[in-house]
Image (cartoon, helix red, strand yellow):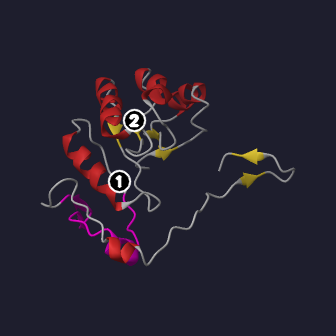
Amino acid sequence: RLFWMEDPTPAENQASFRRIREMTTTPIAVGEVFNSIHDCHQLIAEELIDYIRATICHSGGITHVRRIAHLAELHHVRTGFHGPTDLSPVTMGAALHFDLWAPNFGIQEHMPHTAETDAVFPHAYRFDDGFMTPGEAPGHGVDIDEALAAQYPYRRAYLPVNRLEDGTLWHW
């Protein structure tokens, strides 16, 4: 009784989704690495997935993600936007407002930010009893405390790289 099976194969291997769809009734979710509607067009148009996991800040902003949601709606694919802590509270605020608009909204992923991040980015959205609400603040409901942000200078970071024993890069 899985809610969904996420990324059952690398997203670039779209032909495999057809075989997976034939072998399971578990809903399939993919897309947090997609950058445009072209990345997910085949998966949506052929109804090979149940949830599109795009991210507003990685997929061309609200305008472009709206195009993805419109295509998905035509094919009974719901949204399940990516929402980990490596995305800012600004992205979460935008995603929540987008979710309220999307006629094919499915679910919003949410991982709480650190207390320091929440202090730098005061926001109106809340997570209570399994539900997120965007609050009543103007815009996307997220502000920035620039004086506090100055106490946390930017440090460049990279995602880990998976390698096989022979050193070959591998999808993580």
Residue 76: percent from the left, percent from the top? 31, 29
Say whether residue 130 is magenta: yes
What residue span does the magenta drawing correspond to? 110-134
Q: Earlier in the sequence, mark 2 or mark 1?
A: 2
> Residue 106: x, y in percent?
30, 43
User: Total label count?
Assistant: 2
Alpha carbon distance from label 2 to label 1: 23 Å
Tell me if residue 157 comes above or below residue 31 in the rendering.
below
In the figure, 12 relative to 58: above or below?
A: above
Left or right, 163 with reference to 51 = right
Q: Secondary structure at mark 1?
A: helix
Which residue lies under the disc numbered 1?
Answer: 91
Instruction: State the residue at coordinates (46%, 39%).
Output: 28
Q: Amino acid at mark 1?
A: Thr
- Tell me the kind of residue under disc 2: Asp
Q: Is residue 111 left or right of residue 24?
A: left
Residue position for label 2: 50
